[in-house]
Amino acid sequence: MKITSRFTVAVHTLLAIYAFQGKHKLTSEFIASSVNVNPVVIRRTLQSLKAAGLADVKAGTGGAIPVRQASEVTLYDIYSAVDCVDGDLFNFHDEPNPDCPVGRNIHRVLEPHLKRAQEAMEDELRSVTLAELITE
């Protein structure tokens, strides 16, 4: 299982916006050339980032601009904005056998560990800002 590439595309998109603001017109075509994807992918990404209050897009010739300081945007903000995961990161198979001792207990035994794993990943994403990535 993988988190969709929407997350890394969105991070790349925002980093390009911060890196090139004031130097280039930040159109979806320009950003797409950096990400190496179709501009339609960038337009969809920008819609999600705009809805989350992370970027703004001026229609026509305006291009994209950041809304917040890079130090105020975490990887978790971006992860949440682009809906990489719908709810829980780990999903259980449907209807394990209740007559089997493993099937009967798998959810109860495994679920708390998987929730902690997801929380740890999300905490790590909360701890990294775009400003840090720009510095790196």
Image: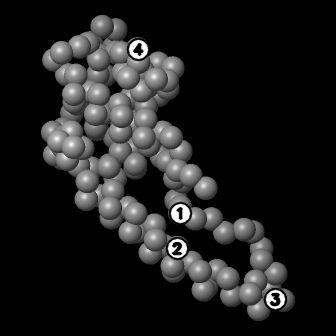
Crowd band around label 4 with a 10 angstrom C-alpha radius: few (<14), some (14–19), many (20+): some
Tag 2: amino acid = Leu
Tag 1: amino acid = Asp
Considering the numbered disc 3 on the image, is that residue within a helix, a strand or a loop?
loop
Q: Residue at x 46, y 23 (%)?
A: 36
Q: Which mark is on residue 104?
A: none
In the depicted view, which residue is nearer to us: 116 or 95?
Answer: 116
Q: Is residue 7 left or right of residue 54?
A: right
Considering the numbered disc 1 on the image, is that residue within a helix, a strand or a loop?
loop
Considering the numbered disc 2 on the image, is that residue within a helix, a strand or a loop?
helix
Lower sequence index among marks 4 and 3: 4
**Residue 28: x, y in percent?**
39, 18
| Mark 3, residue position | 100
Crowd band around label 1 with a 10 angstrom C-alpha radius: few (<14), some (14–19), many (20+): few
* Above/below status of 107 relative to 22: below
* Above/below status of 47 relative to 91: above
| Mark 2, residue position | 114
For residue 40, say whether it is visible: no
**Residue 119: x, y in percent?**
40, 68
Tag 3: amino acid = Cys
| Mark 1, residue position | 88
In the image, farthest residue toward the front: 136
**Residue 38: x, y in percent?**
51, 20
Q: Which mark is on residue 29?
A: 4
Considering the numbered disc 4 on the image, is that residue within a helix, a strand or a loop?
helix
Separation of residues labelled 3 and 2 (CA atoms): 21 Å
Lower sequence index among marks 3 and 2: 3
Could you tell me if the residues under marks 4 and 3 are in contact, i.e. CB atoms within 8 Å? no
Task: Pick the quarter of the image with the N terminus.
Answer: bottom right
Lower sequence index among marks 2 and 1: 1
Separation of residues labelled 1 and 4 (CA atoms): 34 Å
